[in-house]
Amino acid sequence: MSTIALDVVTPNGSVFNEEDCEIIILQTKQGEIGVMAGHVPTVAALKIGSLRAKIDGQFEYFAVTDGFVEIRPEKVSVLVQAGEFAEDIDTERAKQAKERAESLLQQERDEKVDRYRAELALRRAINRLDVSKHS
């Protein structure tokens, strides 16, 4: 079976690099996309979500923030602000972040709450909790 390389890059550098992925499944702004070796070159915007890579018949799960993906026939490069393996997610910290964001969003509209940032924080926390279930 042909394989495809995956590189997940954050501002701190590469956080995951694998040469032999069977399939990579990403959450783009337009919907979910599966990528295998030989895929047509593509660039797409990613949303906060999961990234799954099948390696040796097993899926590895990552929680990623929004960003971009560059797909080439032999390699997928994922550029995100943060990416985290499912087993590395601190679920207690994610639960606390979720509660803080929900609390901010419940405050009155006239208070000085950056609703957009609070909504992003809530989506990131929910995503991290969802992905952590696959560890």
Image: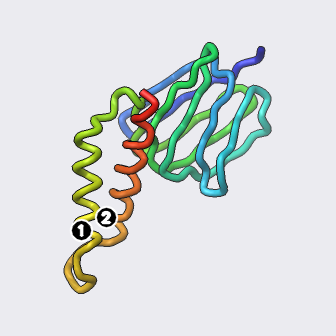
Residue at x 39% of width, y 50% of height: 126
Q: Residue furthest front?
A: 133
Q: Which residue is mark 2?
A: 118
Can you say which quadrant of the picture contains the N terminus?
top right
Residue at x 23% of width, y 42% of height: 93
Asked whether, in this view, residue 119 is left or right of residue 7, the answer is: left
Q: Residue 25: horizontal and vertical position, in percent? A: 63, 37
The type of residue carrying mark 1 is Leu
Residue at x 56% of width, y 47% of height: 68
Residue at x 54% of width, y 29% of height: 7
Residue 58's image quarter?
top right
- Look at the numbered disc 2 and give the secondary structure of its residue: helix
The disc label shown at residue 104, or none: 1
> Which of these two is toward me, 128 or 120?
128
Which tag, 2 or 1, sits closer to the chain's start?
Answer: 1
Residue 36 in sight = yes
Real-space CA distance between mark 2 and mark 1, rounded to the nearest whole angstrom: 7 Å
Q: Residue 86: horizontal and vertical position, in percent? A: 41, 31
Other-residue count near label 2 (Cα within 10 Å), few / some / many at <14 / 14–19 / ≥20: some
Instruction: Report the colour scheme.
Output: rainbow
Asked whether, in this view, residue 48 is left or right of residue 101, the answer is: right
The type of residue carrying mark 2 is Ala
Task: Tell me if label 2 and label 1 are in contact, CB under 8 Å.
Answer: yes
